[in-house]
Image (cartoon, rainbow, N blue to C red):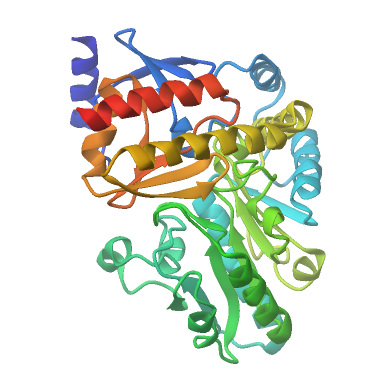
Amino acid sequence: MEAENLMQQAENHMLHVYNRYPVVLDHGEGVYLYDTEGNKYLDFAAGIAVHALGYGNEEYNQALKAQIDKLMHTSNLYYNQPTIEAAEKLCTASEMDRAFFTNSGTEAIEGAIKAAKKYAYEKDGCTDHEIIAMNHSFHGRSLGALAVTGNAHYREPFEPLPGIVKFADYNDLESVKSQVNEKTCAIILETIQGEGGIFPAEKGFLEGIRRICDEKDILLILDEIQCGMGRTGTMFAWQGYGVKPDIMTCAKALGCGVPVGAFVMTERVAASSLKPGDHGTTYGGNPFAGAAVSKVLTIFQKKKLTEHVKEIGAYLEERLEQMKDQYECIRARRGIGLLQGLELTIPVGEISNKALAQGLLVITAGNNVLRFVPPLVIEREHVDEMIDKLGMALKG
């Protein structure tokens, strides 16, 4: 009854822009979540790829509690130590040179777009530059992020959108080349398309785009908001391909629950793009968020989480492939590491709800893909438990 009352209260007072699952989550422990009725759920959603460390990591929790007692906000008019340390650690992990902290992944995309346009403006003083984005991509829901999101369903109600954006086909280099002209200032894509259905980039595709960018002084922006932070077995997915971007966005697991994102760039781009007054944020990079990012990156290194993801990710792939061979309704498996998808021939929303009834949280990507983005600390036994629960949902 308590859960029903809470859900009704939410519907009475909160803007209905989400069709939420009928459960009120209360607390978490390890890789499990518990609702207000005491029911237990194995979490293979991780708050949409956010809770990389799972729930109740004591080292992380204590770092945040200590920062709350010390200082939570100063604005960016002043320096603060936690964010300085976080920036250094993020630049080291990402092999980039300069970082700007935001409140979300969408804001990171906005900043990346602005940096690319300012870089081009600094070269020729023109404001009619174009960006090439990918069909079936997803970069966020603000107007600037929607402008580079290649999905008409998200874009159409809010058009006309800012900027001049052309769309190419993902993993089709000729499609990208056909859109390039003297006005192109940036090419933006997800290293692994997430919302679009869990499609990893092909190595030759990324390498080809990098060559185009180098030849024409176009900036390559890689969106690693979902696929970054160790999820593919390297700290950022592009590192597994060996194709370095000029600007990269990240968020989600960057704060492991604290709302924080970032865009990072090379020194070459930083020196010729955003200057004082060009960009800013009141909350972004506050001491509390900085403490979260700093501790997360420390724990990642200490736990050698990327190595763990390589091992467990391979096992998850193996079990999902076995499941694909077992069930006719599974058309394909796609993904890398602990970012996986199963393409189904039956409604994925129904399966996701049936999984919830079995005590499993698994979300969707697009209209026909089940998405698996568990905490990076899962073990083999959790993969086996997930397979059992998902199997019951598919049979039901």
Task: Point out the residue furthest to the bottom here.
Answer: 182
Residue 7, how many percent across, how many down? 22, 23
Q: Residue at x 28, y 34 (%)?
A: 352
Q: Residue at x 79, y 54 (%)?
A: 95
Residue 342, how many percent across, how many down? 38, 45
Q: Residue at x 47, y 34 (%)?
A: 319
Residue 228, how many percent across, how many down? 61, 47
For residue 48, above or below residue 158: above
Left or right: 179, with 112 as reference point: left
Left or right: 77, with 159 as reference point: right
Q: Residue at x 27, y 62 (%)?
A: 153
Task: Point out the residue furthest to the top here.
Answer: 38
For residue 301, above or below residue 368: above
When asked about the image quadrant of residue 48, the answer is top left
Quarter of the picture holding the N terminus? top left
Which is nearer the eye, 315 or 198? 315
When asked about the image quadrant of residue 182, the answer is bottom right
When asked about the image quadrant of residue 189, the answer is bottom right
Which is nearer the eye, 281 or 48? 48
Left or right: 257, with 75 as reference point: left
Which is nearer the eye, 169 or 145? 169
Residue 16 is at least partly visible in this image: no
Residue 272, how many percent across, how many down? 76, 73
Question: What number of labels is visible?
Answer: 0
Residue 105 is at least partly visible in this image: yes
Quarter of the picture holding the C terminus? top left
For residue 210, above or below residue 179: above
